[in-house]
Image (cartoon, helix red, strand yellow):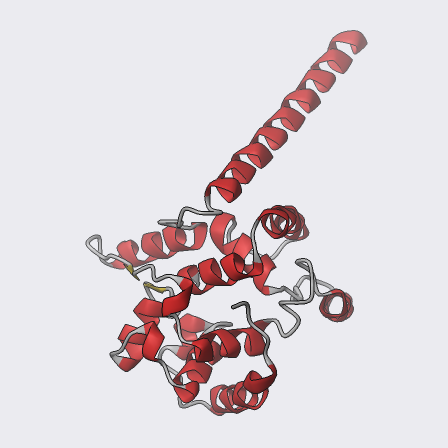
Amino acid sequence: MIRTLLRWTRNTLLTFVALVLLYQVWIFAHVLWWIDHNPTSTAFMSAGLARQQEKNPDAELRHRWVPYEKISIQLKRAIVAAEDGKFIEHEGFDVEGIEAAVKKNLKKGRLVAGGSTISQQLAKNLFLSGERSFLRKGQEAVITLMIESTWSKRRILEVYLNVIEWGNGIYGAEAAARRYYKKSAAALSRDQAAKLAAMVPNPRWYEHHRSSRAYQKRVALIKRYMGYARVPR
């Protein structure tokens, strides 16, 4: 009886490990494919579409891919200034940011901050859910390492700008620029870029609350640091 139980436990664990490894291989295959092929959808897009279609079965996402060179340099600088000032320097993780997040989480007694870089946010957007858990953060770290080890910084920022959410059903810089300013992502001004970058942490809320004091303060802060932001050429 004990031998049977041990054998069953061992086989179950081996099966679990094999499934986890296969999942990592599946993810890495996608990461390699996307080095020079553009993602047509992401985990966040799928979740967003499902959410939209709960209210309207005919709902569709607004998303149009544009190459890196057709996105305003102002938006690139604004996003880096707002989301990851050390983007060019780090290899996927901002150690100081993580330390600050850990202290905040310990103080709160739960996972409330992640100290995420652009690379980490991209990993989450492409493959994971928006839930906060240590298990998900662990998987996010693995995917971040995959991306950073195979993609250039330019490619990381290009994909990030093309897939992140900018409001209900709005994904990517081009759709956001058309939605809020009736122009292409290439034509965005410094002020418009800062306003879009300020929406990223909570895009569905900011879509309808861009007159809030918190939003205006964030825009002003981003504009102050945009000139110092280093972005890939």
Question: Quick one: 233 or 74, which is closer to the camera?
Answer: 233
- Residue 171 vertical placement versus 188 (above, below): above
State the residue in front, 111 or 82: 82
**Quadrant of the rendered structure where residue 65 is?**
bottom left
Judge left or right: residue 8 versus residue 28.
right
Quadrant location, the N terminus: top right
Q: Quadrant of residue 119?
A: bottom right
Q: Residue drawn at (43%, 72%), measured in percent from left and top?
A: 203
* Residue at 63% in and 64% down: 116
Task: From the viewer's side, name the closer residue of 106 and 220.
Answer: 220
Q: Residue at x 46, y 61 (%)?
A: 158
- Residue 52 % position (x, y): 30, 58
Q: Is 181 displayed left or right of 203 in the figure?
A: left
Relative placement, left or right, of 193 versus 108 is left
Find residue 36 and report its horizontal and vertical position in percent.
Answer: 44, 47
| View extreme (left): residue | 58
Furthest toward the front, the residue is 233
Q: In which quarter of the image is residue 11?
A: top right
Kindly identify the residue that appears in the image at 19 percent across and 54 percent down.
58
Residue 66 in percent (x, y) is at 34, 62
Does the image show residue 165? no
Labels in figure, total: 0
Residue 72 visible within the image: yes
Q: Depth check: give the residue in front, 23 or 93.
A: 93
On screen, 32 above or below 94?
A: above
